[in-house]
C-alpha cells in the first residue's frame, strides 16, 4: 500500500493532466452534439415571386424575362441572390423567382408542362439533356423570350455575366 501511495504522490501531476484532458474531451463531445446546424435561408424579398401557374404564363409573352428556379435553403443560391439583386438594380429589370419547395403533388400537371417548356438543350456535368430534366439542381437561371426558353444555366452567375446575358437577350433596360 505504501508503494501505491508513493507512486500516486510522485505521479499526481500526470494523473491530473490526464483527468483534465478526459473532462475536456467529454465536454466537447456533448457540446458539439447538442448544436444543430444553422439552416441558411435565401433572401428573395427583392424578386418577383411567381407560383407554378404564373411561371407558365411567363411563356405566353414575347417579352424577355429572367426566371430563377431554386430552393430557399440552397446554400449556392444565398450568394447568387446578392448578385441577382445587384444586377437587377444596376441594369433595371425584374427577376422572377420560383420556389421549388412550394410545388406540391396537386400541381403535377403544371409541373410537367413546365418541364416540357424547358426544352433548351443543356450539358450538365457531361450529361446532355433538355434543361427541364435537371429541375431540382439549383439555382437554375432561365431566359424566356418569344414564348420559349432561349438560355439556361445551372449554378451561380456573377454580376458581369448577368449584365452580358440580360443585355444580349434584351432584358436589361439600363445599359452600362
Image (cartoon, helix red, strand yellow):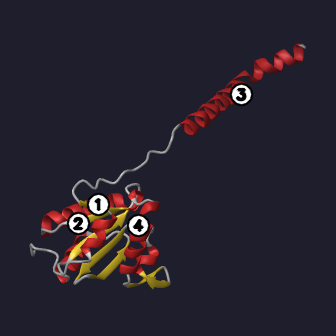
Give the Cα separation between the discs numbered 1 and 2. 10 Å
Q: Which residue is mark 4?
A: 138
Pick out the residue farthest to the top. 2
Neighbours of disc 4 within 10 Å: few (<14), some (14-19), many (20+): many
Pick out the residue farthest to the right. 1
Q: Is residue 95 above or below residue 175?
A: above
Q: Which residue is mark 2?
A: 95
Q: Is residue 31 above or below residue 160?
A: above
Which quadrant does the N terminus fall into? top right
Question: SS of the residue at dot 3?
Answer: helix
Ranked by sequence position, the earlier of labels 2 and 3 is: 3
Q: Which residue is mark 3?
A: 14
Contact check, label 2 and label 3, Cβ < 8 Å: no
Q: Say which of marks 4 and 3 sits in front.
A: 4
Give the Cα separation between the discs numbered 4 and 3. 54 Å
Which quadrant does the C terminus fall into? bottom left
Which quarter of the picture shows residue 160?
A: bottom left
Residue 121 image position (x, y, % from top left): 40, 86
Ranked by sequence position, the earlier of labels 4 and 1 is: 1
Give the Cα separation between the discs numbered 1 and 3. 55 Å
Q: Which residue is mark 1?
A: 81
Q: Is residue 26 above or below residue 72?
A: above
Which quarter of the picture shows residue 158?
A: bottom left
Residue 166 image position (x, y, % from top left): 20, 77
Amino acid at each position: 500500500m505504501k508503494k501505491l501511495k508513493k507512486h500516486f504522490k510522485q505521479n499526481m501531476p500526470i494523473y491530473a493532466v490526464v483527468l483534465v484532458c478526459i473532462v475536456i474531451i467529454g465536454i466537447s463531445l456533448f457540446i458539439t452534439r447538442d448544436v444543430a446546424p444553422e439552416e441558411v435561408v435565401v433572401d428573395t424579398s427583392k424578386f418577383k415571386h411567381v407560383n407554378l401557374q404564373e411561371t407558365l404564363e411567363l411563356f405566353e409573352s414575347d417579352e424577355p424575362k429572367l426566371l430563377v428556379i431554386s430552393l430557399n435553403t440552397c446554400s449556392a443560391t444565398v450568394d447568387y441572390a446578392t448578385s441577382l439583386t445587384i444586377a437587377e438594380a444596376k441594369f433595371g429589370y425584374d427577376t422572377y423567382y420560383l420556389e421549388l419547395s412550394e410545388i406540391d403533388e396537386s400541381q403535377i400537371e403544371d409541373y410537367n408542362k413546365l418541364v416540357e417548356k424547358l426544352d433548351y438543350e443543356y450539358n450538365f456535368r457531361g450529361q446532355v439533356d433538355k434543361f427541364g430534366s435537371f429541375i431540382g439542381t439549383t439555382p437554375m437561371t432561365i431566359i424566356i423570350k418569344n414564348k420559349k426558353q432561349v438560355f439556361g444555366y445551372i449554378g451561380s452567375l456573377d454580376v458581369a455575366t448577368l449584365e452580358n446575358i440580360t443585355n444580349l437577350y434584351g432584358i436589361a433596360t439600363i445599359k452600362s
